[in-house]
Image (cartoon, grey):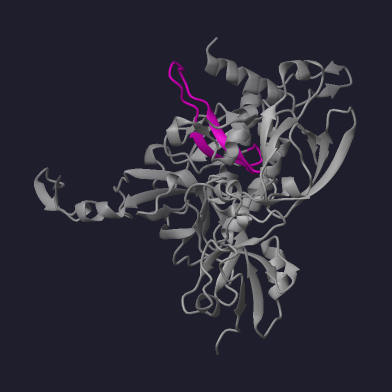
Amino acid sequence: MTRCGLRIVCVGALVLAFYPVALSGAGLAEETTGLAAATALEDTLTSAIAQGEKSVVAIARIKRSDHDLNAQLDLRQDSFNRLRPINPPRPGDHDFIPNEYATGVVVDATGLILTAHHVLREDSDYYVTTADRKFYRARFRAADPRSDLAVLELLNVSKPMAPITFGDASKLKKGQIVIALGNPYAIARDGQASASFGIVANLSRKDGPTLGDANLPIKPSFHQYGTLIQTDAKLNLGTSGGALVNLKGEMVGLTVSLAASLGYEQAAGFALPVDDAFRRALEALKQGREVEYGLLGVELDSLTLNERASGRHGARVNRFVVGTPAQRVGLMPNDVITHVDGQPIYDPDQLMLSIGKLPAGAQVRLTLDRGDGRSQPAVVELAKFWVPGRKIVTNRPPAWRGIRVDYVTASREFASWAQQGQVDPQGSVLITDVEQNSPAWKEGLRPDMMISHVGNNRVADPKQFHSAVSGKTGPVQLRLNLPPNERRVRTISPDEG
């Protein structure tokens, strides 16, 4: 039996389970036929597709450098087969085929479109075609490389759109039927999403490795620690950013990639799960804000084979980083973190994922094994993880007297600063931006300076800083982490006017 035939038989068997045999007084009535079972499955699939496809859109990406090429005349055959010079098709024309394309999902009635971060480029213009064949220009609202999520904003939306209905990926099980809706090879560029179906093949899969400097493997994506839904639904080029829906038409995943490997006949498809971390990231992106991720501040090792064979589990602390929550809570080398918020930890990746799912500032309960056979609790408030890659933020927090601050750990230079002893172990905040000619600028404050105190109050995170300066109308003294030969205390006057 072919793979396709086996799938139909199995799915048909699942449908039969929902159609109990009718009983008569004399015995068993006529059993549900195979045709009825197939029709029931067909009705379920078409209903789910109809529910989901109205919220799926086609995205065309046009490099700005290509617009000049498009202005050149082209020779085309007219209705009498004569070659005539005409302008080539442009975005919005029915026969325009973009070189770069993807899929998106409506997530707000005002015209906000969720898609995958990796399909977008800042050197391009974006055009979106909706299910009702409307055509729109789009611009960035926000983008986050760690979650691989981005939100586009449609321009000149005249009437409310139909947002997708979200399901809960945390309740998915292997074997559940799912449907992928997307724009493969740009054939859905008229806004009519293409559909394929399959099953959930696996859960909590890891994205492929990424090579960084010196070809060393790095994990810039949140999903390289093991979050992805694996499905055998067909996902072709262009379906990234599309919806993976269940049989109710609820979106349970955002399709993102193929797991193509040399020597494999067919690639597996992956989707980002619609879970709490997904929803948190999406809400921040819809508002144009940065998505923040928690940081503990430890370098981890796996347990040895003998330790795991003896029944131990967890991730071993190799070292902590100065100025991070790990140091402030007292974590030590050789501590084994066995639980995060009561959930067991089995390896370093799982610990990184458990911490990374939480926002900066979240309080976390750790359970430690210090080798004496006793468990020890520790409560820690997370700092902020530095996210590599290009972020897009259109809604920045307001400046205070010309400066914006963030967690010191949110800088790509933090590890170097910590190694060189430039980080205050008790905590401070980092100046990320200083507006020219502002009171802070005139006092010599510049990006990458660190503030340890407002007046006599220690400020170890942005929340403490903003609380310390809130409501102050007169001059405010800031203490900076600077060498002894430099002026450490600066007095910031109120904004003029």
What residue occupies the far front of the structure in this picture? 485
79 shown above or below 397: above
The spot of residue 30 in percent (x, y) is 75, 19
Q: Residue at x 42, y 57 (%)?
A: 134
Q: For residue 348, which quarter of the picture?
A: top right
Looking at the image, residue 124 sits to the left or right of residue 319; the answer is left
**Magenta span covers which residues?**
246-275
Q: Could you tell me which residue is drawn at 73 percent across and 35 percent down?
A: 333
> Where is residue 440, by image quadrant?
bottom right
Please determine whether, in this image, residue 375 is positioned above or below residue 426: above
On the image, the x and y values in percent for residue 194 come to 47, 38
Residue 316 seen anywhere in this rendered image of the structure? yes
Quadrant for the N terminus in the image: top right
Q: Nearer the viewer, residue 372 or 208?
A: 372
Toward the top, the furthest residue is 1
Residue at the image point whose x is 82% and y is 47% from the top: 379
Residue 288 is left or right of residue 63, and the answer is right
Of 474 and 217, nearer the camera is: 474
The answer to whether 314 is drawn above or below residue 408 in the figure is above
Residue in front for this viewpoint, 47 or 176: 176
Residue 259 is a magenta residue: yes
Q: Which of the image's four quarters has the C terminus?
A: bottom right
Q: Position of residue 251 (x, y in %)?
A: 62, 43
Tell me if residue 282 can be seen. Answer: no
Q: Position of residue 55 (x, y in %)?
A: 54, 50
Q: How many marks?
A: 0
Which residue is more in the foreground, 440 or 161?
Answer: 440
Residue 382 magenta: no
x 39%, y 46%: residue: 189
